[in-house]
Amino acid sequence: MKVLLLSLFHPELVRGGAQQICYELFEGLQAEPGVEPVLLAAIEPRFAALYKSGARITGFDNRPNEYLFLSRDYDYLWHKATNPLLIDSFAEFLATVQPDVVHFHHFLLFGINLLTITRRVLPHAKIVFTFHEFLTICHANGHMLRRHDNALCTRASNMRCHQCFPELGPDFFFMREMWMKRHLGAVDVFTCPSRFMIEHFVTWGLPRDKIRHVTNGQRDYSGGAGLQDSREKRNRFGFFGQMVDNKGVWLILRAVEQLRAEGFTDFIVEINGDNLRYASEERRTEIDGFLAAEKQRPYTEQIVFFNGAYHVDELPQRMRRIDWCLVPSTWWEIFGLVISEAWMFARPVIASDIGGPKERIRHDEDGLLFAVGDSRALAETIRRACTEDGIWDRLSAGIVQAPSRTIMVDLYREVYDDRPPPPVPVPTPSSPTPSSPTATRPARSRPAQSRPAQSRPAQSRPTQSRKH
């Protein structure tokens, strides 16, 4: 079985949960007997040095079966590939690789219309699509946050979306939904890493029987050393991830300011992250201003320390420096890969009470939840974590092992192999129900087994030197 995985960015170039999970799956499938994974990671023109003259798809770093999709002329309004040569090269790449399964982990920088192109080029291949956010539903970067007040959005509609984007009329959002569903109709199976997501997509109109819950999993970086440290105080907090608006770094800084104003300063916060350039100007100014002012304080009075970006191999060293992991996301955090990383080291997580964190963390049993977007609630939770006797030991002991990469690979093998899925819980009467009939096409009939790999001519496989 040959499996083509499409990733937004390569994790060696841009850190992010979606691309990290895609690469974990790629590496995990390499160890599976009878499976040959191929990775195609999209990049954008800011990586100009990687754009070889005349190339549109090229090998990556001389690594077997790893390729870069050199995105250009991407239409961010309709999330569409527009460059004819690039589309032709993608079609040629599909015809050359001849995968049995094409697994999209994103369409950003590829174009959602490449789903339909894939179906036309490979009519018998199985197309799998994993949702890592709500970009198909929400024009606001898939975050489902109301733009005028940053309140969480529970559903999309032509008028509600128009209120967020007054420059775009309700008819645009009507057409956008049709456009998205038209191309998603080429997909055989959708997967979501968290169960709460399923209800959002069913409400939007996707058929429940085509959506599977497949948890994110990753390798264990702890080396079994999660509890070897024995600090007397458990007052060191850490943030790990993207420094963009919806990840809530600014919320941490406001909580620190409040606690400092109240005279409580016996704690440390370490910021580990990157990509502040993708934050809004308002948030960049706020974060840069706070960090600059913090550095001007005497060292003994500093609370917040910025450690910068990190590679996954550096995670053990940085995670062992802290006691608590902060996940103050202000959007529907889909899964929270950092939660799994913290659990590897038996670090309790303090997180917003929404989405994936709320689904995964058992409040006051293996972590703590606080009201989303409320810096005062976060400050109170930080104070409690520092001062309540025995709380760290109790919560740390309650942590259950995070999902492994092996579990994730096994679940995706079930999806690829057409094995019956586990039953999806039927929503209770209070849960959302579809507001409109689905606009997707009926699932096409498929052969009982994938085409044998030996039926493809050996010379059809691409080489690293080939350019498209």
Image (cartoon, helix red, strand yellow):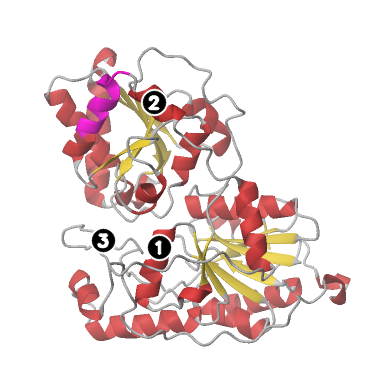
- Few, some or many C-alpha atoms within 10 Å of disc 1 (few <14, some 14-19, many ≥20)? many
Residue of label 2: 394
Q: Is residue 92 left or right of residue 78?
A: right
The tag on residue 145 is: 3
Please, is residue 464 above or below residue 353 in the view? below
User: Based on the displayed image, in which of its 4 quarters is residue 223 positioned?
Assistant: top right
Marks 1 and 2 sit apart, C-alpha to C-alpha, by 30 Å
Q: Position of residue 424 (x, y in %)?
A: 48, 66
Q: Is residue 246 left or right of residue 58?
A: left
Instruction: Locate the N terminus by quadrant.
Output: bottom right
Which one is in front in this view, the residue at disc 1 or the one at disc 3? 1
Residue of label 1: 197
Instruction: Locate the C terminus by quadrant.
Output: bottom right
Of labels 3 and 2, earlier in sequence is 3
Of labels 1 and 3, earlier in sequence is 3
The tag on residue 184 is: none
Amino acid type at mark 2: Arg
Question: Which element is circle 2 on?
Answer: helix
Question: Which element is circle 3 on?
Answer: loop
Marks 1 and 3 sit apart, C-alpha to C-alpha, by 15 Å
Question: Which element is circle 1 on?
Answer: helix
Please, is residue 407 above or below residue 267 in the view? below
The part of the chain drawn in magenta is: 379-389
- Few, some or many C-alpha atoms within 10 Å of disc 3 (few <14, some 14-19, many ≥20)? many
Q: Could you tell me if residue 189 is visible in this image?
A: yes
Q: Nearer the viewer, residue 430 or 11?
A: 430
